[in-house]
Image (cartoon, grey):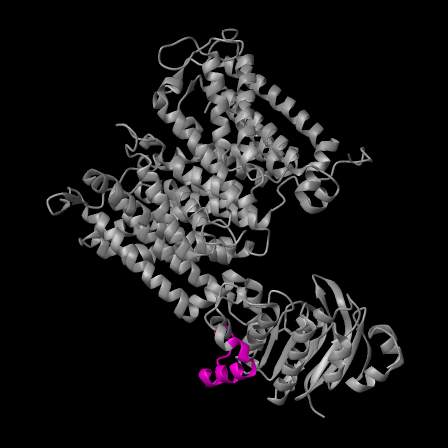
Amino acid sequence: MIDFINYYFIPALAIGSVYALGAVGISMIFGILRFAHFAHGDLMTVGAYGVLAALAVIPLPPLLLLPFGIALAIAAALLVDRIFYKPLRNLPTIYVVISSFGVALIFRSLLQLVWGSENQVFVSGVRPPLVLLDTFRISVLHVEAIILTAIIAVLLHYFLSRTRTGRSMRAVADDAELAAISGLDTETVVRWTWIIGATLAATAGVFAGLDTSAHPNLGWNLLLPMFAAAILGGIGKPMGAMAGGLIIGLAEELSSYNWIGDSALISPSYKTAVAFVIMVILLIFRPQGLFKGRLL
Amino acid sequence: MTALLSVRGLTAGYGGVPIIEDVALDIGKHEITVIIGPNGAGKSTLLKTIFALTNILGGTIAFEGRDITGLKTSSLVPLGISATPQSRNVFPNLTVGENLDIGTYAAPPPDKTKTREKILELFPDLRSKLKQPAGELSGGQRQMVAMGRALMSEPRLLLLDEPTAGLSPAYLERIFDLLLDIRKAGITILMVEQNAKQALQIADRGHVLVTGRNFASGTGAELLADDNVRRSFLGGGVP
Amino acid sequence: MEITGLFFYLVSILIAGGIYALLCLALNIQWGMGGLFNAGIAGFFAVGAYTSAILTSAATEKHLGGFGLPVAVGLIGAALLAGLTGWAVARICVRLKSDYLAMASIGIAEILRLVIVNESWLTNGSLGISGVPRPLDGMLQGRSADILYMGFVWLIVLLAYVLTERLRDSPWGRSLRAIRDNEISAAAAGKDIEAFRVQTFVIGCAMMGVAGGLAAHYFRFLSPSATDPLMVTFLVWVMLMAGGSGSNRGAVAGALGIWALWSVTEIFTNRLPPEWITRSSYIRMLLVGLILQIVLQKFRSGVIPEKSPPQRFRDGA
């Protein structure tokens, strides 16, 4: 039981938090801009490398340098939206989808150009785990990730339900045409969607990079579980995406626990497949997700 | 009479294909103007064109003497025009309160609480449903939310696209009564309506549109009395 | 570069270009004609490559087989198994709307990759399969063998081209385009949309499998890195978009054009200072990403746009 909590449950919540943060952006972009943003994983990587770059100049704990990663990710997101996505906005969505594949590649190759494709470690050395009651040994990073994600969830909920920009975003996600008739400025809403999506993506990217190391494929490898989380939560439902991220994280990690007998239920090398199977089952039987999101 | 809104030689459509051609009309201040005509006559297109949701191919639109041709929707709302579409007229996942609030974003009224109070007096049904998602309401209640949202910016001109579409006869009368109340509050109304007969009864002025062009116009009573109009568009019969 | 060197360089470009042309034709059936967004090309390519490699390589302890069968059998096996995989995928996913289908197909490619990397008994994992033979091996020696193989590849491309052209002009192809352009009216006309889509997907996947097999035989060695989604899935999409989706000639032209560009930039990047050479592939990837954006914005219908085939079949099936 203790092992279960130490080695499966807490890490599952931590990876689930990473998925949750990434999935919020995917879900909002899906809801407001109506397309699957395939460069979202690489946007996370951009954020992680932004912190890495700041770390080279300012020797502070990486999490304190998060604003640099966020700034880089926001700038990157707004720039590609302006140059690449916006001109395709009024065409069938598939063009923007294809374009986002290209943007994923552009992000990745730029990072590789500057940093190469080797693994980059944020902090060398091992941080001792947090020991509670002599039994629970929990990674400090995992605790940080879980707490920060919980705080972000509360803030996001407040933002979406109470502020003018948040409500406008939900309105556009609900019915873009009616939002235009109501005189809402869709472009402002789009801009905020990217700002929030990029902020959370960068945060997720830094956590993922800190957990192991940063490398150019960091975010791309997380894209599928994040899509699964966004669909699970219901497209256009950011809070649903958060819940979806946690569920996918739990499902992935717990699938390799030795539930029956001594060996893992599913070999850990097939973890990614778990998220994928959940996603396909959902797409077929319940495409609106658990929380009644929109259908594309 | 100075017209609040005057349209001259308006030709517009989707893409380059005109749906309405050379349409002219004047909307008097504090009046209810109704546009009637057969299906496909371009009634909704006319309304959408005034609200900058189609491509204008020719002609001018002036509001309070100011040329507003070619302005974007988001700049029309601050000038004092708002509109409700025919279907999908509320944000279903937002609460009724939030729906109303959205109406103030493009053109904030001087005193939001007071405006909201006025609107809730106009539509008392909504008061108990403020925290409910608008998607859960009945068709008639949704229409009230839609009108409420449009009125939150305290417009001087309200454009309504078939406000009674799909409503039961009982609700239909309520909506028409509400329109009279809205006019009493000093708001000019331009509406497209399928229930032509009832609409003309409350209207100050009516315009008949056929195949995208002006066909006839007059006061509500004149059009109701006109044999030609009655036979063609009001379901025939002697009054 | 001396003349013979240049010549063999051209041969190598044409071999790889031919394999890409085959992939583009296959994607053109799925996307250009059927409107199916397959973002997992690398997966079906890999299935074909491993099938053909295992069937044709000599017996070994390291992985399943090899069975030492003729290359033709290997390629047929590649088509069958890739087509079968495609059929299983299509049965589940073909109903999904384009964005969702893209996600699902990426996921399938990812799972196939996991299987290839992890199941060493089958594929020898990351160490790969060596000694994959070429057709008519030993008839020509050294570099001349490449010329022979080039002919073989282009013979198959030609076959595939004729096949896809036939398909496009056939009543079947017409129905397919009708479905792509207006699903509702096609359904109203009594077409079994799902069956058409499954068929489209399977045919495309089988061709992708053959392309995978051809690549394995060309390199005589196969490891998971040969089925990199960037080099397979992504580049093929760029090629088809640039060439003109819907047009088979466009698909071939796009494959050759982009591959030539890719290869020529290699000559250029090899002249960079040494510290940049290691990064040259990133520069090329960046370039491809940018080309795609330009194509999407300025040349959406591609170099050779789709034309409706002549109205030979008047009843249109």
Q: Residue furthest left?
A: A134
Let me know if residue B103 is in the magenta part. Answer: yes
Q: Residue at x 46, y 48 (%)?
A: A231
List x then y, in percent, for residue C93. Answer: 54, 37
Nearer to the camera, C253 or B4: B4
Q: Where does the N terminus of chain A fall, quadrant-wise?
A: top left
Numbered-mark total:
0
Q: Which residues are magenta?
A: B101-126
Nearer to the camera, C96 or B116: B116
List x then y, in percent, for residue C64. Answer: 41, 14
Q: In this rendering, would A220 be left or right of C36? A: left
Nearer to the camera, C267 or B175: B175
Q: Residue furthest top?
A: C139
Q: In this rendering, would A126 be left or right of C310? A: left
Q: Is residue A273 visible?
A: yes
- Of helix, strand and loop, which mostly describes the magenta segment? helix
